Image (cartoon, rainbow, N blue to C red):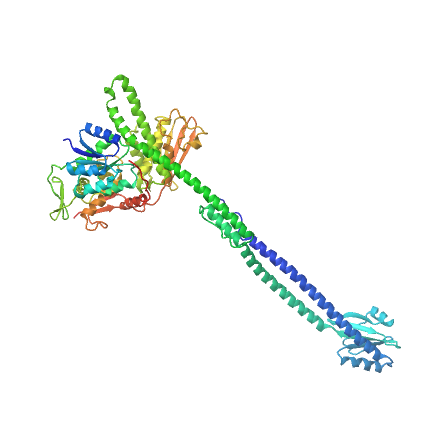
Amino acid sequence: MVQDVARPTRLRRRLTIAFVLVAGASTAILAATTLLMVREARQRDSLDRAEREARFGLRLAEGLGSGSDLQQFVDGFEARGVHAVMVEDDERFDSDPQVAPPIPARVRSLAAEGQLAYARLDVGGRPYLLVGGRPLGSTSELYLLFPEAAADRDLDRLGAVLLLGWIGTLGLSGLVGWLVARRTLAPVARASRAARSLAEGLLDTRLPVGTEDEFGAWAQSFNRMAEALQAKIDELTEARARERRFTSDVAHELRTPLTALVSEAGMLAEHLDRMPPEAERPAELLVADVARLRVLVEDLMTISRFDAGQQDVRLEPVDLGSVVAATIRARGWEGRVRARVGPAELLSDRRRIEAIVGNLLANALEHGGPDVDVRVGTADGWAAVEVRDRGPGIAPEDLPHVFERFYKADRARSGGSGLGLSIALENARLLGGRLEVSSEPGRGARFTLRLPVTEPLRAGDGAVASQREDGATDQGGQTS
Amino acid sequence: MNEHLLLVEDDGSIRASTTLGLERAGFHVTSARDGREALATFQREPFDLVILDLMLPEIDGFEVCRQIRRDSAIPIVMLTARSDATDVVAGLELGADDYVTKPFDLPVLIARARAVLRRASGDDQHVVIRVGDLEIDPGAFSTHRGGVELPLTATEFRLLETLARRPGQVFTREMLLSAVWGYDYLGDSRLVDVAVQRLRAKIEEDPANPRWIVTVRGVGYRLERT
């Protein structure tokens, strides 16, 4: 199984961030422009008003005397919310001595030339607009100070509102972006799930086509691909099933004449010594060949049952060492096989273990000669049977193939069906175990059967009951 | 001697060679080629043993087995296609005593036939064994409960007798296979399990919760002491 490297939420996050960035930048530009324009407009308004007031004030100041007249004149401005300053020669008359800013030299010089001049000042931390000029026919100058604090406060408030709005927009756009991304990417997530379930073998998985957009077209292509895949796999499965049925049928059809052959050869074998000499040898060969044919047909039947999944497992407490010892005893190999047996108890199928061990030993004796070692033991939750011979071993190029059907490394010598190790491997798998081989050419081969040591669950009648349940799937009809 | 044996087998070659082999082994063999002929022959003549192929045209071996068992405890050895298929258990549940898997060696079939015939022949001893309200008479080859004879097959009878001779002792399946069926190595433990079930069905009040023949988890079976 391939590990999922891609993180399914990453694209959604990226889309959301892009959405927030676009929304944030555009609203920020909009807010800043608004703030600037409003500020400019307010300042222009304030200046226009100040100019009008100043021109009016200058007109009033025409023809004023000096001294206390001037002081009285500037005091009159206080009532209108404006501070005024009259400068005559080097003498200043302030309407409010507490707000008495120095008049910038540039403003004074412009005013002295008879122009209306202005400047923005900061007096005691408050912003003021200073406008001044020289009344007609006078040597004095009138300066008016308009407070602008209120206008600045308004602008600050507007700025704060815009900032809050911007933050709100960011949040909202994030949320909307996430929702839209999720909704947009939903077909992708669906397709991803569909592809995964296809990979897991649910070949009838299809995508809803739904909308007539890119995703819809994609879903259609996906579905066409899935259909093609399903058709192909069905075809292959059917071909494979046909092939297996054929193997099974051949084996079963061969079995009937073989049964008669085995009986007849058996009877012939009993009377070999009473045959005329010219018939004895062919009869002997015939008997041996019938025995070989029998092994082949029985192995073929066994393997076709594995292919059809018609094998049941009868679990019972098994002492691995005693099974190995019994196998050696039953086949009369006591003098040829050395067994070193440690304790190994597990819940398994005794007859299948017997079949595997019997096959491994027969194999070792056939290829490795009489010096065969068997070791039984447990390690790390596995019970193991190791069969070791001191024969010529298996060539490295043959080693990966020894469990393949009909694979014979040494075709000239092998007397078996070529299915023995395949069957042993199938049996080992059926028991949840493993069968491994290693070999050093010239120094022999080593086969190791490993079986999981499981806790005994139940025994006695349960074994028969479970066997029958398993067998219920076995519907293979045959002729006898 | 010369036990009379009914061989039911549809394939001509197998029938001919098996008949030949069994006759050489000293049996008197009558053969039938299908289920109908088998049942007709069985009604007509007395037999000591039936060797029955399960896959038969028209009436199959299971049905033949069922009909024979309806009113006869005659030993039956099945010929089956495969040892691990359901048909073995199905045949045993119908009351067959043993089975041989095709292709078989004639000596094996002959040994199975002799073993099951031995089971069916009475003993010399006339010591009646009593277990609870059961009376087991190995000499008369009969089992009674309250004066009524229980219809046990030879295998079921020998199984009960074996257990009853040593009440309270646990018998492993291997021990029972050896004592009752005559297997000296690696017989099929299903033979024991199915025979125990059939025996329970005949002698227990509630076969699902046996009072007499109890299962010893992971070991085998035991007949309770009274």
Does residue A39 sit above or below B86 in this rendering?
below
- Tell me which residue sits at (22%, 38%) in the image: B35
Out of A127 and B6, give the one closest to the viewer: B6
Out of A221 and B140, give the one closest to the viewer: A221
Does residue A129 sit above or below A240 in this rendering?
below
Q: Residue A37 appears at what percent x and percent y?
A: 72, 66
Q: Residue A93 appears at what percent x and percent y?
A: 82, 78
Give the quadrant of residue A310.
top left
Q: Quadrant of the C terminus of chain A?
A: top left
Does residue A162 sit above or below A265 in this rendering?
below
Q: Is residue A257 visible?
A: yes
Q: Is residue B172 visible?
A: no
Out of A168 and A357, give the one closest to the viewer: A168
Q: Residue A449 appears at what percent x and percent y?
A: 37, 36
Q: Residue A394 appears at what percent x and percent y?
A: 42, 28
Give the quadrant of residue B46.
top left
Give the quadrant of residue B71.
top left
User: How many circles with numbers are drawn on the protein?
Assistant: 0
Farthest top residue? Answer: A277
Out of A400 and A440, give the one closest to the viewer: A400
Farthest right residue? Answer: A137
